[in-house]
Image: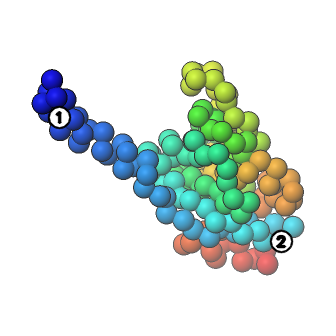
């Protein structure tokens, strides 16, 4: 019986390893700035630019530093009916949907979904196309005066908000 268990572990181990490794691999971190009437606001964000990273998002996190967040990047414009849910997300979040020019086109506050059934979790949709989304702690946007029309810059896109300074 013990030998059978060892064989099963050897056979199934490689299948389990990629998922475990993926979950433990820290996301790339960038400095990001939101420019608007209330001035530039800096954040340290994890970057989710791969499908698996975007699917996982901030699931399972019990806290997020005050100046931290996650930036979801897409190679192509996403339709306004496509959105985000809070399945397995433990902390309330603000989300800003960002267009291809770096402008915030929609903001929302999202509450955790306590259901174990993903279909029971509400989806937050911007109603307009977007190329990126920024999630931070709930209440951050209101506290800092961040809103629709503000410009978001990150590495490789720093120049786009310079006219606002």
| Residue at image mark 2 | 39
In terms of image quadrants, where is residue 6? top left
Q: 80 left or right of 29?
A: right
| Mark in the foreground, 1 or 2 | 1
Q: Which residue ends up furthest to the front in the rendered image? A: 2
| Residue at image mark 1 | 6
Determine whether 17 is above or below 9 in the image: below
User: Where's the C terminus, which quadrant?
Assistant: bottom right
Q: Secondary structure at mark 2?
A: loop
Residue occupying image coordinates x 86% and y 53%: 142
> Can residue 7 be seen here?
yes
Residue 64 image position (x, y, % from top left): 67, 54
Determine whether 95 is above or below 45 in the image: above
Q: Earlier in the sequence, mark 1 or mark 2?
A: 1
Residue occupying image coordinates x 47% and y 58%: 26
Residue occupying image coordinates x 67% and y 50%: 63
Q: Secondary structure at mark 1?
A: helix
Mark 1, other Cα within 10 Å: few <14 / some 14–19 / many ≥20: few
**Residue 26 versus residue 162: which sits nearer the camera?**
26
In terms of image quadrants, where is residue 111? top right
Real-space CA distance between mark 1 and mark 2, rounded to the nearest whole angstrom = 60 Å
């Amino acid at each position: 019986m013990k030998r059978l268990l060892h064989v099963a572990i050897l056979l199934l181990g490689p299948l389990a390893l990629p998922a475990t490794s993926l979950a433990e691999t820290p996301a790339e971190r960038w400095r990001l700035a939101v420019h608007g009437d209330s001035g530039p606001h800096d954040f340290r964000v994890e970057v989710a630019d791969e499908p698996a990273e975007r699917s996982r998002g901030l699931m399972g996190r019990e806290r997020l530093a005050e100046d931290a967040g996650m930036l979801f990047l897409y190679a192509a414009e996403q339709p306004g009916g496509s959105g985000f849910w809070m399945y397995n997300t433990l902390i309330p979040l603000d989300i800003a949907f960002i267009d291809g020019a770096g402008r915030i086109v929609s903001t929302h506050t999202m509450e955790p979904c306590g259901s174990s059934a993903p279909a029971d979790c509400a989806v937050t949709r911007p109603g307009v196309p977007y190329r990126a989304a920024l999630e931070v702690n709930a209440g951050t946007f209101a506290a800092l005066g961040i809103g629709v029309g503000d410009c978001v810059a990150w590495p490789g896109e720093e120049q786009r908000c310079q006219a606002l300074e």
